[in-house]
Image: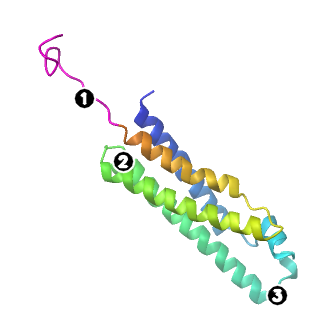
Amino acid sequence: MHVRRVGFGFHAVATLALIAFGWTYLSSSEFMAYHAAAAGTDWKDLAPGLQALGLTALRLVGAGSLALGLALGVILWGPYRRGERWAVWAVSVLGSGYGLALSVAAFSVASATPGDPPWRAAGVLPLLFLMGGILSLVPIPEERAPGVGNGGRS
């Protein structure tokens, strides 16, 4: 299999995961079980003001993740597939950076509270974007016509 296609595959999987994560958070009507464990209380026991604050934070992260995922998807579908080098860098850097921020946030919650957010899964995201970038930027030797550029030997 072509190395760059594998790189594209890593980027595509990570982008789809980012979109799914964003959609899950954006469409949530209350915080997740690991948020409840971190907060030490159930959703229904929170004051209405704290519920509003929690939903706003969830939806902000969800909207940001969904927007970035969709933008990266557009770049992957168009410029990236056409081989435009800036697109590989954009997807790799933006995806890795955002994935790293999500990972650090999730790990911070896991290490400071009884909550168990999916920090390990979040940690895979920047690695997928990073590996996708590395594989997509691997130089591939150009094919040469027989006798051209090889000292006249075929």
Q: Which mark is residue 47?
A: 3
Which quadrant would the C terminus be assigned to in this image? Answer: top left
Q: Give the residue type that dot 1 points to.
A: Glu
Q: Is residue 109 above or below residue 80?
A: below
Q: Of the residues under marks 3 and 1, which one precedes in the sequence?
A: 3
Residue range of the region highlighted in magenta in the rendering = 139-154
How busy is the neighbourhood of tag 2: few (under 14 within 10 Å), some, or many (20 plus)?
Answer: many
How busy is the neighbourhood of tag 3: few (under 14 within 10 Å), some, or many (20 plus)?
Answer: few
Q: Quadrant of residue 55?
A: bottom right
Residue 32: x %, y % from top left:
77, 67
What residue is pinned by disc 1?
142
As measured in the structure, the alpha-carbon distance from the residue carrying label 1 to the one carrying label 2 is: 19 Å
Residue 88: x %, y % from top left:
38, 49
Q: Residue at x 41, y 29 (%)?
A: 2
Q: Mark 1: which secondary structure?
A: loop
Q: Is residue 57 above or below residue 18?
A: below
Q: Give the residue type that dot 3 points to.
A: Ala
Magenta stretch: residue 61 in it?
no
What residue is pinned by disc 2?
80
Q: Left or right: where does residue 107 sit relative to residue 43?
A: left
Q: Observer-nearest residue: 104 or 35?
A: 104
Q: Mark 3: which secondary structure?
A: loop
Q: Residue at x 57, y 69 (%)?
A: 63
